[in-house]
Structures are given as C-alpha cells and as structure tokens.
Amino acid sequence: MRLYLIGMPGAGKTTLGRALATAYQVPFFDLDTEIVRRERRSITDIFAAEGEAYFREQEAAMLREVVQAQPEMVLATGGGTPCFHQNLDILLSTGLTLYLEVPLDELVQRLQRSAANRPLLAQLSDPAALAVRMHETFAARQQFYERAPLRTPPTKSVEAVRRLIDRYQTTS
C-alpha cells in the first residue's frame, strides 16, 4: 500500500498519517520532515534563504525520491505539494491519494497557534489576515485537491478512514 495524504496546512495530514501507517503496519513519511533532514535547515530558513521556487523544486525531487524508494508507506505531503511540478500526477499514478477536507474556519483556528512557524503564513498574526490568506490559498489549490479519488474530514476516526480506504480498494 502507498497512501498519500493531501490537503491544506493544518488539515491533520501528519497526525492522521502516523495513525494510518501504524494501523496498516507500513512506514510513515512526512515530506516536509524529509526535506528538512536533507537540507539540514528548517522550512522557514529554506524559504528565507532560497525562496519558494527553490523549496518547490526540492519538494518535487524529494517526493520522487521517496516514491521510488518506498513500495509501501503512508506519506503526508505539504499543503502545496500537489500544486507544483506535476506532483499530483505522481501521487495519483503511484498510490492512493486521500484529500483531508477541513472547513476553512476550522483551519484558521488551528493555524492561529502555529502560523509563525509556517513560512507562507508567518507575517499574518492578525486572524482576519490569516483567514483571507487561507481563502486565497484554498481557491488556488482546490482544483488539485479535488482530483484525489478519496476525501474525508480528518475528524473521522482512523478506523472509519481505514474502512473508506478498504472499501475503495475493493471496488476499484
């Protein structure tokens, strides 16, 4: 099994991904963590020193590397991963992609606590500005997220998500 989790920042991809990897007894990877490991610096530092274009190139390269090296895994992608460098095509063609759909208001509430640690949100300490940015970001990314064959809110239990995945695999 190769399962890829996509969705907006704060959707719960890493948390659900770890739980699903444990449930399916396969390795778990977080794409951002893998980039940090390779670069030996934080995502924030990468963005500050090299910019978003460089980060997106590294993200695409790391995605391809992890996919090639891991025949079985659960992978939590970054929020923008499916939107650049034909990454979504890689995800869709090499495994099962699950979109964690979360209402924007809930995402804004979750991200208010961690926005300072996210390079594309760090300057947005005001909740209204964060909400505007999240709506703009979602508008740009929605077309990519909605191409995933499966979607679920992250508030569902791991067991419910497993049933959804298992049902999908037996019917496709």
Image (cartoon, grey):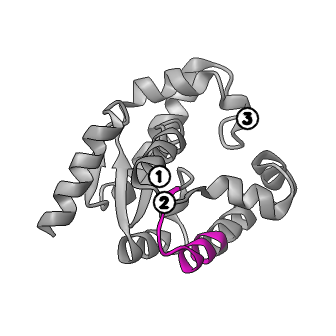
**Residue 114 at x, y percent in the picture:** 66, 28
Residue 35 occupies quadrant? bottom right
Amino acid type at circle 2 is: Val
Instruction: Name the residue that disc number 2 marks.
Output: 26
Crowd band around label 2 with a 10 angstrom C-alpha radius: few (<14), some (14–19), many (20+): some
- Residue matched to label 1: 21
- 52 or 88: nearer the eye? 88
Looking at marks 2 and 3 on the same chain, the residue that comes earlier in the sequence is marked by 2
Q: Which residue is drawn at 78% across and 53% down?
A: 47
Q: Which residue is drawn at 49% across and 44% down?
A: 13
Q: What's the mark number on residue 133?
A: none
Query: Gap in Å between the C-alphas at discs 2 and 3?
Result: 29 Å
Q: What stretch is highlighted in magenta?
A: 62-76
From the viewer's perspective, is 27 left or right of 148? right
- Residue visible at 40% across and 54% down in the picture: 24
- In x, y percent, where is residue 146? 30, 55
Element type at marker 2? loop
**Label 3, on which residue?**
117
Which badge, 1 or 3, comes first in the chain's sequence? 1
Mark 1 crowd level (few <14, some 14–19, many ≥20, 10 Å Cα): many
